[in-house]
Amino acid sequence: MVLGQLAAYLQVSGGVLNILGGSLEQQGDAPAAETTGGILKIANTYLNVVPTQARATPFLFANGGELQAIGNTATNRTSGNGNLIRIATDRGDNVVQDNYFGGWGLALPAGPLAGAYGPNVAIGGAEHAREVCEAEHRIKLTGTLNGSGNATVPHGIAAGIVLAANQRILNVSVVAISGSARYPYPFVSPCFYDNTNVSISGGGAGFANLQFEAVVRFR
């Protein structure tokens, strides 16, 4: 599968695009793939960057949407320069890990980072030192939803040296339990969390007084 030659680039503005394997190409100085509002998942794919190209734009561009780039391999840079991946908007769901950059750069926004940006190999440029390489952890929180189908539970995650406790949280998923049945909790908006608690709300009376399990991914 060869993508990126039929148009200037692939742009994900909503929904999910999965690229799993094959080769992604872009001969011009434009992103091969960009996410502006949806989710781009690219894994185990050969990123066929022109090795002599002076790139003003990144090959993969997270420009407001979510990017998960895992286990990809880029063409080795020769006389070219520029970024393989640029993260314009940091998000806790962003994952850039286990990629071979081939000497191309990784551009990250300034300040503390919530996404998982490392470890990666053969990154060129100054951002190599800013990779976020902490291991990911998971904890399970349990309890009982109240009469409105909501709950607030302490997560117990301490602040890190750079990141506050809430910035270390990557994702929260919740299931409600009724007997032997388990139901995904229907959040009306993303689960809220702060430096102390995870707040579960939106299930309504149909989830009143049920047991729940919340899995918190953090680093």
Image: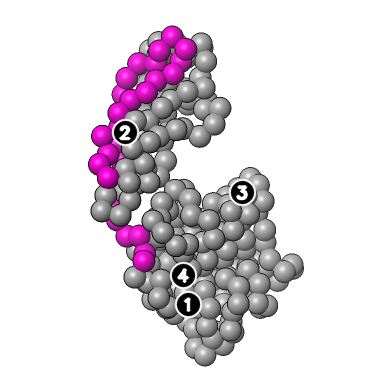
| Residue drawn at (35%, 16%) of the image | 144
Which amino acid, mark 4? Leu
> Do labels 2 and 1 touch, CB within 8 Å?
no
> Do labels 1 and 4 touch, CB within 8 Å?
yes
Q: Alpha carbon of mark 1 to alpha carbon of mark 4: how far?
A: 7 Å
| Residue drawn at (25%, 41%) of the image | 158
What is the crowding at mark 1: few (fewer than 14 residues within 10 Å), some, or many (at least 20)? Answer: many
Which amino acid, mark 3? Gly
Q: Is residue 156 magenta?
A: yes
Q: Is residue 145 left or right of residue 1?
A: left
Q: Alpha carbon of mark 3 to alpha carbon of mark 4: how far?
A: 21 Å
Which amino acid, mark 2? Thr
Of residue 72 and residue 163, the one placed in the foreground of this image is 163
> Do labels 3 and 1 touch, CB within 8 Å?
no
Which comes sooner in the sequence, label 3 or label 1? 3
Instruction: Give the residues in magenta.
Output: 130-159
Name the mark on residue 106: 4
Of residue 93 and residue 194, the one placed in the foreground of this image is 194
Which amino acid, mark 1? Trp
What is the crowding at mark 3: few (fewer than 14 residues within 10 Å), some, or many (at least 20)? Answer: some
Name the image quarter holding residue 138. top left
Q: Alpha carbon of mark 2 to alpha carbon of mark 1: how far?
A: 39 Å
Q: Is residue 167 magenta?
A: no
SS category of the residue bearing label 2: loop
> Do labels 2 and 3 touch, CB within 8 Å?
no
Name the mark on residue 104: 1
Residue named by callout 3: 38
Which comes sooner in the sequence, label 2 or label 4? 4
Q: Is residue 126 visible?
A: yes
Q: Nearer the viewer, mark 2 or mark 1?
A: 2
